Amino acid sequence: MSLQSEVEALWGRYQDGLTAADTGSDAYATLDAFLDALETGDVRAAEKAGDEWAANEWVKQGILLNFGLRETEAREHGGVTYNDVLPLADTADLGARGSRNTPDGTVVRRGANLGDDIIMMSPSFVNIGARVGDGTLVDSCDTVGSCAQIGADVKLGANTLIGGVLEPVEHAPVIVEDGVSLGAGTRVTSGFVVGENSVVGENTLLTPRIPVYDLVEETVVYGHLPPERRAFIRYVESSVGDHDLFEGGAYKPAVVATDVEAETLEATEREDALRE
């Protein structure tokens, strides 16, 4: 049987009532092999087909099985006891792959995939099922949520939140494509897709519920930022603006997207030079 078929069969048993107390060594061997495949990048929580990203449902099922069929245990890391169903990932090989992570707070959970030549500053956290592509910077106070897919040569500014989407299993997670630069304090949630080579300003909120006013194509889109855009947050009039409680009107957030300007690209290239 393939790993996928083994996970799907185990998922069926779990749906029929299998518990951690009843799980045998064969099932745990499957779960361990699945986590290894996640960490090496042989399987991914979502993949791009053509222009669209889609979740690999069986992969998300495998992640949920690792929660549902394992008992919480007391574990040790850095002299601190923590309680979880899984240990942290083994990051001993990062140096040999040209990557670096600073001490006291770069946390990578078992089942996360880290590329080569990445930088993880402390404190930062990468959750199970997430992927961080080659050459990417994860800055201080950043969170990369479960199953999020971060491309190559991405810059996550300090205090950036990349949300996780684990359930429902058919929903694609947050996607940040290759070459993207997210300014400090940016939040990307609920399966939003950031198109490649885009530059997003500080403190921008990207979520499917907030419209993106694409001034390049002169249209309003939801759930994704097209490639090669410069995006920033602005506020537009709200439909409740004429309510008596709102003196001077009420406003709601929106994202404005324009062409990536040469000056913006030059600034990000200067940042690249600082990392070499």
Image (cartoon, rainbow, N blue to C red):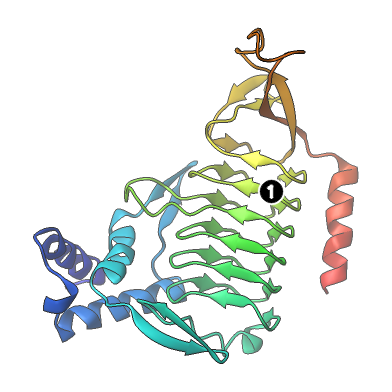
* Relative horizontal placement of residue 263, taking residue 43 as reference (left or right): right
**Residue at x 58% of width, y 73% of height:** 115
Q: Which residue is mark 1?
A: 186
In which quadrant of the rendered image does the N terminus lie? bottom left
Asked whether residue 227 appears in the rendered view, the answer is no
Q: Front-most of 39 and 86?
A: 86
* Relative horizontal placement of residue 77, taking residue 263 as reference (left or right): left
Q: Quadrant of residue 228?
A: top right
**Residue 184: where, in percent of width, then height?**
75, 53
Residue type, numbered disc 1: Thr
Q: Residues within 10 Å of mark 1 (few under 14, many from 20)?
A: many
**Residue at x 74% of width, y 60% of height:** 158
Q: Quadrant of residue 152?
A: bottom right
Placement of 163 over or under 85, stated as above or below: above
Placement of 157 over or under 22, stated as above or below: above
Q: Front-most of 88 and 273?
A: 88
Q: Residue furthest front?
A: 245
**Residue at x 54% of width, y 45% of height:** 189
